[in-house]
Image (cartoon, rainbow, N blue to C red):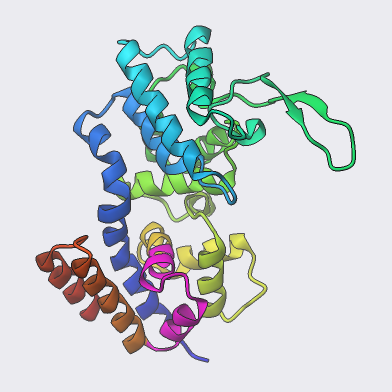
Amino acid sequence: MARDVKGCLDCFERLAELHKSRLVEPHWKDYLAAPGNPWLAMKIFLIGYAFERQGRSEDYSWAAGDTVARMMSKYDKFVPCDNTLVQRFWKDFCRRLESASLNHKNNPCCPLGTKYITENKGKAETETSTSKPSVIEFLAANNMVDIVHWTKTKIAAGTAGIRGAHEGLCTINGIGVKIASLFLRDICLVYKCSLPRSEDRRLLQPVDVWIRFVIQLLADDQSLSDEGCADYIIRHAQDPEAANTGIWYFCARACESSRYKVRESLNDMVRMKASITDHLESLIIDGKLAESQQLHWRSSVQTG
C-alpha cells in the first residue's frame, strides 16, 4: 500500500512540540530557570531518563528525585568525587524504597563495586558486585558536575562529540543505548541544536516498539533493523529528532497505544489528522490544554 510518508512525518514533527510542552518541559522547568545547577541537571536525568527501561519500577525515578532534593538541602556545593556523597546518596535512595528490590545491576544510583545477592532459579544464591559507576561517579570521572551542560557541549562539537556523549552515558550503571539516545534527543529538542546529517545522528534516535512499528510500515519493510529505522527517519524527515519524538507521542498518546489505530491512521491522512484532533479535544476536556492552545495545534496539523 502506498502511504503518504512525507505527510505522516510532517504530522509527527509538529507533534514533537506538543510532546515537549506537555511531557518534557515540566521536568526541565526548574533547571531552565537556574541553568548550571548540577543537582537540578541530575534530577532531570534521573527522573526523566535514567530509569526508562522495560519492566522498571515507577518508584525508582521518583525516589531518586527526592534523594536529589534531600542532597541539595544538605550540600551547598556539588563535589561528585566525594565518596561520602556517593554513599550517602545511595543510602538515602535505598531508604526511600524500603523493602523493594533495588535492581543493583541496572540502577544508575548504585555505586561501583556495591555487593548484592543474585537469585538463580534452581541454584544457590551468588554474591556479585556492580561493575559500572553510578551517575555521580561518572560525573567525577569526567571532571564535571552538570550532566546537561556536558551533554549539550558534546553535541555542539558535532559528530565526534555526539558519539563521545553517547558512549560516555552508556558507561553509567544501567544506562543502555536507547536511554542514552533518548537523553541526547531531548537535549536537541529543548535547545534546538544544529546537527549534521551523519551516521552518528542515528545516536539521537531512540528506537522502541512504536518507532519500529511505524517505520517498518512506512518503509514497507518488516525486516528493517533498529539502525535501519533510525536511518530511514534521518533520510526522510525534515527534522529527524522531532519526527522520532512525534511518532512516540502519536502512538502512545493520540492513539492510546492501539496498533490498529496507528496502522489505520498511517493508511489515511484524513484519519491521522482526525486522531490528532480528537486527542487535542480530550486534553481540553481533561483540563490539560487551554482552548487557545488546542486551536493552535489543530491549525498546525490541518495545514501540514
Magenta segment boundaries in residue numbering: 247-268
**Where does the image place residue 133, in percent across and percent down from the top left?**
60, 24
Query: Is 108 in front, or is 36?
Result: 108
The residue at the far right in this view is 123
| Picture residue at 48% right of the left edge, 75% below the top | 258
Q: Is 22 drawn above or below residue 146 in the view shown? A: below
Per the picture, the main secondary structure of the magenta-coloured stretch is: helix
Front residue of 61 and 270: 61
Q: Does the magenta stretch include residue 95?
A: no
Residue 164 can be seen, yes or no = yes
Q: Which residue is drawn at 38% across and 64% down?
A: 249
Residue that appears at 17% across and 75% down: 299
The single residue placed furthest to the left in the displayed view is 292
Q: Where does residue 49 sit, x and y in percent of width and height?
A: 45, 42
Give the image quarter of residue 251.
bottom left
The image shows residue 269, relative to residue 199, as above or below, that is below
